Image (cartoon, helix red, strand yellow):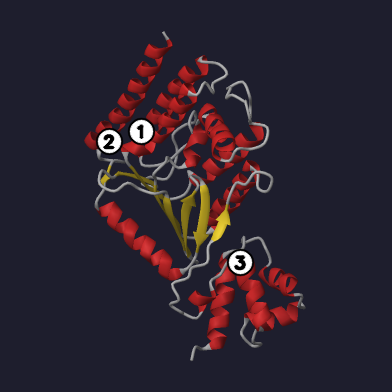
Amino acid sequence: MPDLSHTQIVLFEEIKTKLPENESFVHVIAELLGLSYDSAYRRIRGEKTISLEELYTLCTHFGISVDSLFDIRSGKIVFNSMAIEPGKVSTKEWLQNILLNIQQIQQAREKSIIYAAKDAPFFHYFHIPELASFKMFFWEKTLFQFPGYQGKKFSLKESHDELQDIGRKILMTYSKLPVTEIWNEDTFYIMLRQIEYYWISGLFENKDDIMILFDRLKDWIEHLQMQAELGFQFLYGTEPQGVEENFKLYENEVVLNDNTVLVSTSHSTMSFLTYNVINLLSTTDPVFCEKINFFLQGLIKKSTLISSSAAKVRRRFFNQLLKQLLRFREKIEFNQE
């Protein structure tokens, strides 16, 4: 028989990790359960047992698995979804949700991120506005078929200032966090294939935009290489300043990654998985997170560190990316003649 008072305290401790530090914990609980502050405090301290209805309300609102609270091995895991959906959740709202999550991570006293990347982490595209614009257009038109995009072509003349601003804030926060990323050559290849698809499909308003994107991709690769060399992230076009050894980049030549992210803080561990390319599923289920951690640690052991002191393998990796880019560029230039 589980110790219910202890389980209740564990529940509230987990809820506390999900709230921003500037938000009153007792106020949130009192509001959510329709209680006075005194009644909320008594439940938080375990002096008053919460009802089944209150347990349901708390777990549903904060995305907490009841199985994990009682250590029940049902095989079921509760995930929260962050998804772009036409008519329901806009790209702006999705980005704002990501920003809120990453700011909460930053506020933790201790934190780390491991990111196994099938596609380049989308944060990085906001270093270069032109690349971010292409990615967001691709998401809205091709992935999610937003209304109003039928017959519409991509153009760099069209600005997305509001989305760029949110994306830039995400990148600024992400660049300050201790991050380990695991890439392979295909991580970069996905972006090239998307550009090629738009070129073949005649979805560029101006053909010169293709060459501009290639120029900016070269800048992007060289900036990523510089960050890997220095061992920390910093914004493109700014002075290289950051925390030494805060950015570790690995190349994996064996396992094709699937965009898996593990966030560890002083309070909790959370896993993120992608579906439909960029939409996110997240969970704090401890058993699942431990399995993800086990997999990622094994993946790191099978990978080669290409940041900081690993100059030779780093040059080889980035030279391969630049060669991929050059081959695509020459292919398109040849077919345009």
> Does the residue at mark 1 contact the one at mark 2 (Cβ under 8 Å)?
yes
Amino acid at the residue labelled 1: Gln
Q: Identify which residue, 335 or 321, lies in the foreground.
A: 335
> Which residue shows up at 55% across the image and 44% down it?
170
Q: Earlier in the sequence, mark 2 or mark 3?
A: 3
In the drawing, does residue 199 fall left or right of residue 251? right
Position above or below: 286 against 177: below
Secondary structure under the numbered disc 3 in the rendered image: helix
Position above or below: 114 against 21: above
Which mark, residue 314?
2
Q: Earlier in the sequence, mark 1 or mark 3?
A: 3
Q: Residue furthest bottom?
A: 1
Q: CA distance from mark 1 to mark 2?
A: 8 Å
Amino acid at the residue labelled 3: Phe
Residue annotated with mark 3: 62
Q: Identify which residue, 22 or 121, lies in the foreground.
A: 121
Position of residue 287 measured from the top left corner of the image (x, y, whole percent): 41, 70
> Which residue shows up at 33% across the image and 27% down it?
324
> Which residue shows up at 69% across the image and 45% down it?
87
Q: Quadrant of residue 47?
A: bottom right
Q: Earlier in the sequence, mark 1 or mark 2?
A: 1
Position above or below: 25 against 113: below
Q: CA distance from mark 1 to mark 3?
A: 39 Å
Residue annotated with mark 1: 225
User: Dot 3: within a 10 Å radius of its alpha carbon, few (fewer than 14), some, or many (20 or more) residues?
Assistant: some
User: Dot 1: within a 10 Å radius of its alpha carbon, few (fewer than 14), some, or many (20 or more) residues?
Assistant: many
